[in-house]
Amino acid sequence: MTSRDAISPGNTEKANALRSAWILEGPTRVFLGAATFLVVLLLWEGAVRVFGVAEYVIPKPTVAIAALIENWKLILYYGWITSVEIVLGFIAGGLGGILLAIAVHRYLVVEAALNPLIIFFQIIPKIALAPIFLLWFGFGLGPKVLLVAIIAFFPVTLNTIAGLVATSPDLGHLVQSVGGTRSQYLWRVQLPNAMPHIFAGLKIAMTFSVIGAVVGEFTGGSEGLGYLILFSSSQVKTPLLFAALLAIAALGLVMYYAIVLLEYWMVPWERHLKQHQMQNIQWPR
Amino acid sequence: MINNAQFGSSLTKWGATVALAVSLIGTAAAQTADKITIQLDFTYIRGNYAPFYIGRDKGIFKEEGIEVTEIRLGRGSADTSQRIGQGTSEFGFADLPTMLAVRSQGAPVKAIVATNVVSPLAMLSLKERAPLKKPKDLEGQSIAVTPALSTYYFFRAFASANGVDLSKVTEVSAAPPYEPLLLAGRVTALPGYIDAEIPILAAHAGGYDKLDILRGEDYGYKAFGTGVITSDKVINEQPKLVERFVRAYLKAFKFAIDKPQEAADILMAVDAKLDRNVLLDQLDADIKHTFTNASTEKCGLGYMDPERWQSTLNVLVTQKVISSAPKLEDVYTNRFIGGRC
């Protein structure tokens, strides 16, 4: 018997099975998520039928999905337009956020100077900024991308700084001891080390980017899923409204999981570390 | 004497030269066309937008040497008026009382055509739930309003012109569109446009006979509705362009009045998401009530009666929408409509 078995005698296999269930990768995970979603849809459909809710208040999911299918070309086209705004804005905000974090972390002068501005931009409701941008810059793609970037940068900046700060100083001493420079430490050690944090920020930023693109479209323009929401609500075409909402939700999910996938590919060591750590947790019966 | 072959060949050369000259002139004319953009006031196409699309798609603007590169939907008349003042587009379409308010804030906008010479605003309710046969019936009702919007000033002006005791009316602050609120009974009455959301509401309520509608015009509210606007800069620097634009617009406007079915078809071709019946209802409401009145009969389509501008200004001043009244001659001009007055 190993020392492990001594701690939870006779339950090694069950314990190991439970431990791997905690991780819940792959098919089980997807199934659970999909099943829950389906249950929600069924409850929604049931509630609308049973309580006789009028369509202009909230349509049945079957009606909303029917509207989605009926207008699929339009929704695909508008979805593309919104996606471009999201992706360009996210890249701008993400890159900008990382660079800003590096500048703020590296140079105390920059931190002192920019800190209030950064927080100011975060606190200002972007719904207030949107009409101002659109008035200055027009209804085109540029101001919308700018709006998304401004909404997206803060979580990236905050998390990147946290990641840079979290690098163990021992690594800094190590770099010094082999004759490395401050810059080499930053780019070759601190940044890679900060990747898990950066990705946490990017995941949040991606959800913000979707919101930002929709807010931008509420404020100006004649195309996109956000505009479609505006249009269908003014025309009291509630099934189309919900179809647009479903499309935005789907788009948001795809975008978010794209970042998750990117993280899976770019930061393998964090995942392996976690698995290793999980195996060493001993939970008493 | 030239023989047949020589005659044929010289004819060909002559014909070719003429053809070349004509095509060069044609290209030159096309190249000198003025490129403009038009800024509309709201988020969806409604009936009285027809003249712009008719003008563009039937080549009426082109005949006047104008190329419309973009017709943009908008986010409210105040926003549109500001953009025209800024110069983002040469011409716009906005609620004229709202434009007046924006002008009083310093934006250099001016009205050049009144499309709705009579205000399309009305108070309405669902007959069954809360009858509205006369203005006083508003007392005891709840109204959806957004304090910043034109419909709010209208509601208050309507109330004061008809002696409605506002303390007996519940104002519910809500963002438009208000129609679902009315249909769901969250409010009992609304201010609305007979040529915009009222047809949409009627379609959802099961017909006009389900609604009680009190038009502002019938109850002491004398103001303009939506009209064509431009900036002082465009008028001063390109008066000929404005003249040609208005001429083309009025021609397209007349087309919409005479042939609403075709107008609806043209709008449906622009945006297939719209309801053709709603578009027709919107146009019919305007044709019946707001596109023409005694002064347009006398002076021409789009003519802005000075008395009506004065009454519009009075409403805004009394409702404290504007603090410093601009000079009315800065606010509008009839000089481009080629009218008889």
Image (cartoon, rainbow, N blue to C red):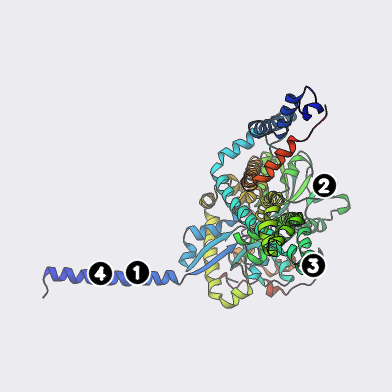
Eye-nearest disc, 1 or 2: 1
Three-letter code for the amino acid on which mark 4 is drawn = Gly
The residue tagged 1 is: B23
Three-letter code for the amino acid on which mark 2 is drawn = Ser
Task: Give the secondary structure at mark 2.
Answer: strand
How far apart are labels 1 and 2 at the CA level?
66 Å
The picture places residue A94, in percent across and down from the top left corner, at 66, 56
Q: Using residue B77 as the reference point, say whether residue B249 is left or right of it.
A: left
Of the pair B194 and B106, the residue shown nearer to us = B106
The picture places residue A157, in percent across and down from the top left corner, at 72, 57
Eye-nearest disc, 3 or 1: 3
The picture places residue B17, in percent across and down from the top left corner, at 27, 72
Q: Do marks 2 and 3 both belong to one polypeptide chain? A: no
Residue B218: quadrant of the picture: bottom right
Task: Give the secondary structure at mark 4.
Answer: helix
Q: Chain of mark 1?
A: B
Quarter of the figure with the C terminus of chain A: top right
Of the pair B285 and A100, the residue shown nearer to us = A100
Eye-nearest disc, 2 or 4: 4
Three-letter code for the amino acid on which mark 1 is drawn = Ser
